[in-house]
């Protein structure tokens, strides 16, 4: 009876609040608040953090103070990623993190769908009162199932919503959120066709954290305890001029010279996303000896899979050249910069971070009934542009992985892929954003929206 009465009181409060427009955005002449939402995986967080960092820089440039808070899943992963994120200026990306209950939007029949209805409702009420208390001028959504309740709550409170889709094809959460959104940002021009023509859809490219544009292969090598090894530290980040790259090469003693490359094995960085990837981990484990004979293997296993991927043998080659990590946090940009090849899933976030640093990619997209096929679409796009090698479905075998990586032992083949991915990234981002990066473009659109309120 009490629960019923409480629910009725909450619903009446919501009705009164939305009808009377009691919320007014926290916008002053030199100060405002912006809410960010996203979570479930790192792919729904890191691009948003990139925008948050760029927004801080932009506001500082205009002598304005911005308060940023993040709404995410109440799991430890979301909270840890957000709270550990630091911008180039040393400031935290978000001033506060609020975890809310969240239910998954599944495309298959499951009893969990029924249970998650209550989580979604709880998430809605939690986010409604967070937004009501904080009074943000705008909410920016990076997607994921956790973003749906806050976007709907923002709509009821008449808070402008901007949402961004990283993948080639939009996810269910983004499709739902688009109904509450004033603007929808996409990473590919082709993605606009999946939304209603009535929506304001804008091509921005995929936001990548500013630290990727200043990533240091030298710092990455130090983190990996390879600072005494010479070698090709990979193509430099896009957005830096050829003269800057040439100057850096001279300052580093021409560390990318052919003589230096031959002094050590190439670095193979294995990524399975923030949660790890059992399929990729298994392929690495089954072929670990061959991999370590030909590469220095840096393996992000995922927190959940760390124990089962720990090597307990005594093979000298593996002990010397295998470097597993449960998760790599702030050092990730530098580690990618140090890598010669990246073996990865085809999540949009990892793809564009590696593309920004022009890394040769071997992609094993997540396939099957438990996924909507977004990673296959992403991988196919990069394959079509000859910017990555792809092993999907039945082709994702140990034998074909070894054959694929054998071709990349040839430095000329790695350079070909690196060049193609740099051209692709430049074509998408350069044509859209010009001299600025996607995160900066989105931050500028948010800033202009807020100051006009």
Image (cartoon, helix red, strand yellow):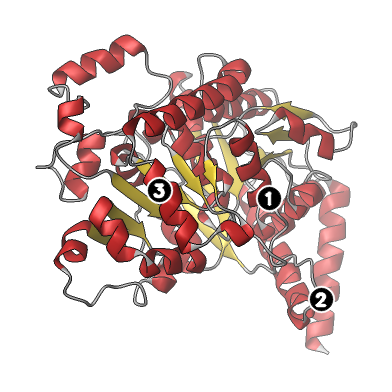
Nearer the viewer's eye, disc 1 or disc 3? 3
Distance in Å between CA atoms under marks 1 and 3:
24 Å
Q: Quadrant of residue 126?
A: bottom right
Mark nearer the viewer, 1 or 2: 1
Q: Is residue 319 above or below residue 247?
A: below
Q: Is residue 266 or residue 227 the one in the foreground? A: 266
Q: Which residue is mark 3?
A: 405
**Dot 1 crowding, Cα within 10 Å, few <14, some 14–19, many 20+:** many
* Inter-mark Cα distance, 2 to 3: 39 Å
Instruction: Identify which residue is drawn at 68% across, 26% down.
Output: 449
Q: Earlier in the sequence, mark 1 or mark 3?
A: 1
Q: Looking at the picture, tell me which residue is in the foreground, 432 or 99.
A: 432
Q: Position of residue 345 (x, y in %)?
A: 52, 53
* Of callouts 2 and 3, the N-terminal one: 2
**Residue drawn at 79 percent across, 71 percent down:** 108
Give the farthest residue toward the top.
243
Q: Earlier in the sequence, mark 1 or mark 2?
A: 2
Q: Is residue 426 left or right of residue 126?
A: left
Q: Quadrant of residue 305?
A: bottom left
Q: Residue 374: which disc?
A: 1
Total residue callouts: 3
- Residue at x 43% of width, y 37% of height: 360
- Label 1 SS: helix
**Is disc 2 placed on a helix, strand or loop?**
loop
Q: Residue furthest left?
A: 228
Q: CA distance from mark 1 to mark 2?
A: 20 Å
Q: Position of residue 142 (x, y in %)?
A: 62, 46
On the image, numbered disc 2 is attached to which residue?
A: 109
Q: Residue at x 74, y 65 (%)?
A: 105
Q: Is residue 135 visible?
A: yes
Residue 15's image quarter?
bottom right
């Amino acid at each position: 009876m009490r629960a019923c009465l409480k629910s009725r009181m909450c619903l009446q409060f919501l009705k009164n609040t939305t009808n009377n427009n009691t919320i007014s955005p926290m916008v002053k002449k030199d100060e405002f608040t912006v809410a960010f939402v996203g979570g479930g995986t790192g792919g729904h967080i890191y691009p948003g953090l990139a925008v948050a960092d760029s927004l801080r820089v932009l506001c500082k440039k205009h002598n304005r103070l911005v308060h940023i808070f993040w709404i995410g899943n109440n799991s430890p992963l979301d909270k840890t990623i957000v709270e550990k994120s630091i911008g180039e200026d040393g400031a935290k990306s978000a001033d506060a993190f609020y975890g809310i209950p969240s239910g998954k939007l599944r495309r298959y029949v499951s009893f969990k769908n029924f249970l998650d209805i209550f989580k979604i409702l709880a998430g809605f009420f939690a986010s409604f009162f967070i937004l009501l208390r904080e009074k943000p001028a705008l909410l920016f959504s990076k997607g994921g199932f956790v973003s749906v309740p806050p976007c709907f709550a923002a709509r009821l409170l008449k808070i402008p919503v901007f949402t961004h889709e990283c993948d080639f094809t939009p996810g269910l959460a983004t499709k739902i959120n688009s109904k509450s959104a004033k603007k929808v940002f996409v990473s590919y021009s082709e993605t606009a066709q999946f939304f209603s023509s009535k929506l304001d859809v804008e091509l921005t490219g995929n936001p990548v954290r500013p630290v990727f544009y200043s990533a240091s292969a030298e710092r990455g090598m130090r983190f990996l305890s390879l600072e005494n090894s010479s070698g090709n530290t990979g193509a430099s980040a896009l957005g830096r001029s050829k003269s800057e790259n040439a100057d850096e090469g001279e300052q580093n003693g021409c560390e990318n010279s052919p003589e230096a490359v031959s002094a050590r094995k190439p670095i193979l960085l294995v990524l399975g996303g923030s949660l790890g990837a059992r399929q990729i981990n298994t392929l690495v484990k089954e072929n670990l000896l061959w991999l370590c004979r030909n590469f220095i293997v840096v393996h992000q296993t995922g927190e959940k899979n760390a124990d089962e991927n720990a090597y307990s043998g005594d093979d000298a080659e593996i002990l010397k050249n295998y470097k597993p990590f449960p998760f790599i946090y702030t050092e990730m940009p530098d580690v990618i910069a140090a890598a010669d090849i990246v073996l990865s899933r085809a999540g949009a976030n990892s793809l564009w971070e590696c593309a920004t640093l022009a890394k040769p990619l071997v992609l094993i997209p997540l396939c099957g009934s438990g996924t909507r096929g977004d990673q296959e679409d992403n991988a196919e796009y990069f394959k079509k542009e000859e910017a990555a090698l792809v092993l999907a479905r039945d082709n994702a075998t140990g034998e074909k992985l070894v054959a694929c990586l054998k071709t990349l032992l040839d430095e000329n083949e790695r350079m070909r892929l690196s060049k193609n991915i740099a051209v692709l990234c430049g074509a998408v981002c350069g044509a859209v954003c010009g001299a600025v990066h996607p995160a900066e473009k989105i931050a500028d659109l948010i800033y202009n929206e807020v100051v006009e309120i």
